[in-house]
Amino acid sequence: MKLTPEQRAEIDAARGQRFETRRITVPELEEILYEPLPVLDHGFVRVVDYMGDDGAIVQSARVSYGKGTRKTRDDAGLISYLMRHRHTTPFEMCEIKYHVKLPIFVARQWIRHRTANVNEYSARYSILDREYYMPAPDQLATQSRSNRQGRGAVLSGPEADWVLNTLREDAERCHAHYEEMLNESQDGETLDPDRRGLARELARMNLTLNTYTQWYWKIDLHNLLHFLSLRADPHAQYEIRAYADVMLETVRRWVPLTFEAFEKYRLKGASVSEGGIDVIRRLVAGENIRQEDSGLSKREWRELMGILDRTEENSP
Amino acid sequence: MKLTPEQRAEIDAARGQRFETRRITVPELEEILYEPLPVLDHGFVRVVDYMGDDGAIVQSARVSYGKGTRKTRDDAGLISYLMRHRHTTPFEMCEIKYHVKLPIFVARQWIRHRTANVNEYSARYSILDREYYMPAPDQLATQSRSNRQGRGAVLSGPEADWVLNTLREDAERCHAHYEEMLNESQDGETLDPDRRGLARELARMNLTLNTYTQWYWKIDLHNLLHFLSLRADPHAQYEIRAYADVMLETVRRWVPLTFEAFEKYRLKGASVSEGGIDVIRRLVAGENIRQEDSGLSKREWRELMGILDRTEENSP
Amino acid sequence: MKLTPEQRAEIDAARGQRFETRRITVPELEEILYEPLPVLDHGFVRVVDYMGDDGAIVQSARVSYGKGTRKTRDDAGLISYLMRHRHTTPFEMCEIKYHVKLPIFVARQWIRHRTANVNEYSARYSILDREYYMPAPDQLATQSRSNRQGRGAVLSGPEADWVLNTLREDAERCHAHYEEMLNESQDGETLDPDRRGLARELARMNLTLNTYTQWYWKIDLHNLLHFLSLRADPHAQYEIRAYADVMLETVRRWVPLTFEAFEKYRLKGASVSEGGIDVIRRLVAGENIRQEDSGLSKREWRELMGILDRTEENSP
Amino acid sequence: MKLTPEQRAEIDAARGQRFETRRITVPELEEILYEPLPVLDHGFVRVVDYMGDDGAIVQSARVSYGKGTRKTRDDAGLISYLMRHRHTTPFEMCEIKYHVKLPIFVARQWIRHRTANVNEYSARYSILDREYYMPAPDQLATQSRSNRQGRGAVLSGPEADWVLNTLREDAERCHAHYEEMLNESQDGETLDPDRRGLARELARMNLTLNTYTQWYWKIDLHNLLHFLSLRADPHAQYEIRAYADVMLETVRRWVPLTFEAFEKYRLKGASVSEGGIDVIRRLVAGENIRQEDSGLSKREWRELMGILDRTEENSP
């Protein structure tokens, strides 16, 4: 990730400011406020604003739980209870706003989550930078044979070189033609004063899907956790998971009690089906069961054994 | 509105705190932060948190508008443009959180707006206070004859007295029976140690719809303005309009440029139909038109003449 | 539940009609279309329209899964996979519309689910019927001592009689005064020609929370299942559970494959925390563990033992 | 738009089916059900399911308006009233489902509308067809000089040729490399048995933004009208407007009374600001006003004169 001197100066100015407020404030999160946290080769995540903390969740829950509970539960216990029993509305009372720079194909996955507010940099109005995502060599994976949505072994040697060169050349050529169609450079300079450029809203169609875009993205904590549980999951595509992992760290700084409960009950917990519960009961009772007798499909059996750690192949 | 000494002390403590933050801060709004603003006889609205200001709207819009516009528009102009052309997403980048005390029949109208986060005080867990809404004498209106949803002349004399007495007696009797069913007073004291009370989730059904409830309500600025445009409207029921009016003042403190544009283009603007535009064009051209020749229904004609201020009955 | 002859005739007319359509049609659901299914003493649920079936879910998923999967999975397998892995968007492709009659205090819980479309009968415009919910004697439960939101033993004898009589008298008196304030009977007859009635939007505040209201409620299948997983749960209040149970049967008729997967993976499945997984692993390995050594709180231990069926108290 | 024989056969099979239903049915819409309506060079819109009609809107509104109104308003009048006063919930009671084929850059604008259900064809699982959008020569517009988001004059001659050739060559080269990286043709044939292809989720990043994708898109009528009011607007980009125009025709078939009201009050109506109302009043009173004395900015003045048809430049 590279910032222009102007961008660095703007960020430093924002980080330098200090205001007095009566609002709930989280010093751990303020520490990294506005600072771009690098993701992939040119991307970043910046926390640019937030509202609430663990205490705000407890306070909101107590409107629903009322006087009687005030003394008997401490905050961590109540948050853990809310998480376990999926009482989600108190977590909606916290809000966070990010500025994110990300490749377009990642943005297309991300935007499927409809419960956030988004303002994206518009290529109808403005010119997109000549920046595109190139996978690191250890991420240049083949198609998985067993899993239609997964990755297999990593490519290497001349084949890897060819892929990387082709990705790079195609992205560069497409972007160069984009500027030529616009008759304008990134800095807004006209290239040929005797031509009128193609409309921006048209020229952008020549860009490749690894071109970087950016947006402001604002979401409440409940919906953020839902997004992260799907996108920090090993089944998620590596490129969006890289963003989710960085965002998880911002959540840990912001609402540490909620983060702990989220990790315990969601990220590291598991869902078990009716049939799975039956198998567990029989195993605990000492019975020796094979998949064939379990009532589970092979795939479900494999997933359950993964949870029970009874097989080499225990990754989800 | 009456606060217990404990409530007053809690509010004063919150108002007394001062934190340092790098976040955008709005001193005008901080001034009233946490303070209950009275509405109706026992209700209130309190701003308890907020995120963003007019500048945050501009900044978010400029992700979409990009470098080129940065110099040419000032903030007020851009906000006015966004409001006029219904570019709503930048207004979603600001968020506010209220604590509201309100009669249940008002809460039922309010909750129809689905784009907010809500935590309501739960009568399954806790006991509702013996507080219920009594209309002020000048609000004791008859049913309108012309408008099925409106109010007509104000009742007075023995008829008004009878209504007020009946509302009061029924609410009080129902609440007294509620406590007796619970076998518990508001303060959690058991009334008769030899009885077990009815479950709270059942006893509450004996309360009348003017009983006060309370909730935390959090919403983004775009959806708040939409709520206010419907609920601060003369067609809205007086009791919810009283809340909307107080909230409008909090918006004016929070985002003054947005408030000004909202007033100009929404609150005090008007929508005109295809047929209405035609009538206006003919009037401007000096033509003398009657409703019968206008192509408009009587009701639409009356509404249009109201906008043009050409009739006594020009209220919307 | 009692229908007027006019209502019965309207329903019969709707049920008597037959149209030809190219749309996907579900005969099992058509059988009960428009028919009121009784709930509680005066309530009902009617399916009044629907869109899609199990096949529509599969078809929508295959836009995402594409050609390659078409041959290898049958419909039931794919639906089961989607349910297990929480791929929720294909279930959003089915839609259902209900007409529901329900007590106001149930409506207030129900409306908390914001992802549906609602049109409620308005007491600003119209007069509410003199119908209110009275609990059946076996539902007249005391407050649970261990669970602030639960019910304990059932009341009986004179205490039960007093509660039922009081609920009835208060509801009846409040409704009678409501009509008197309106100066109008349910049938729209003016009671006293020399008086003008109080505005409907005001008079309604004198009604008790067990008064019945009604609405049209339209929702997609994914959000319906989420609603039902919360409201058909033993923790939900009995009165709303009664509605959820009847609606579950309509889902079984409509999308039987989805219903089966929902039952297996949601209704009868369980979520286990990180600590719970650890306990299960140790139990399966033959270790003898007590709560004290488990790392789980008493409450979590009890919940886990319930899932494993190792205790008398194994209800959730 | 070109269909494969298999696709044509599937569509004909769906169109050939006839079921009996008790549901509301709209013969005008059934006529075109499942049929692809061409848009742009390779795109289409197909209505694949629907729920409700004009009558369903009236019926839902009457739950809110109740008995009293039943006789006095006819359906067209009530729908017109609901549209004029922005009573939106009855329109949410109708639902429609489309299958759409569209270029990725159009899909990215479209998906900004968050109130729909979407299932997109996934390039993580499947291979995208070699189809990309090429603007028709009369759409090859230059960037507007006055409007940052608009189009100016149309390119022609060698410049137009160069743009079209470049768009085509870049899209073709990128797609050919995509297949080569995958080591797989569109039909799923392996190209070189000695190589393993790059993961699909990675290879797709080499495609250009004019590549076609497809999705199922389901939405209620209120939100559809909101989408159409923004996207059938002259300010919308031509390529998405082409879709909106075709969809408008499907709405006209489906709910003709609603369509008529929508056209009258939204598409061909206008919003006027407080200042604009003042100018109109003065004009109607015969006053001669210039922009300088109007209190309106130049831009607002121009927009108002456009509405009043008092200038050459009267397009919105």
Image: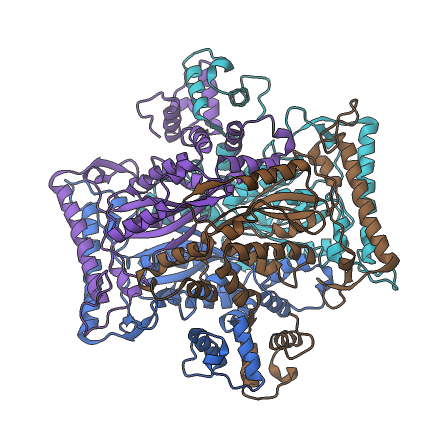
Chain colours: A cyan, B blue, C purple, D brown
Q: Position of residue A194 (x, y in %)?
A: 88, 64
Q: Position of residue C203 (x, y in %)?
A: 26, 64
Residue drawn at x 41%, y 80% as measured from the top left: B313
User: In the visual, does D212 lie left or right of A97?
Assistant: right
User: In the visual, does B233 lie left or right of B95?
Assistant: left
Q: Quadrant of residue D226?
A: bottom right
Q: Position of residue B39 (x, y in %)?
A: 36, 66
User: In the visual, does D209 lie left or right of C115?
Assistant: right
Residue B52 visible: yes
Residue drawn at x 83%, y 32% as measured from the top left: A162
Taking depth in this image into account, of A38 and B187 the one nearest to the observer is A38
Taking depth in this image into account, of C161 and A139 the one nearest to the observer is C161
Specify the quadrant that holds the N terminus of chain C. Answer: top left
Q: Quadrant of residue A231?
A: top right
Q: Position of residue C159 (x, y in %)?
A: 14, 42
Taking depth in this image into account, of D184 and D144 the one nearest to the observer is D184
Residue drawn at x 16%, y 50% as measured from the top left: C166
> Is residue D11 shown above or below B21?
above
> Is residue D159 shown above or below D281?
above
Report the residue that reaches farthest toward the left.
C158
Specify the quadrant that holds the C terminus of chain C. Answer: top left
Residue drawn at x 24%, y 74% as measured from the top left: B155
Residue A149 visible: no
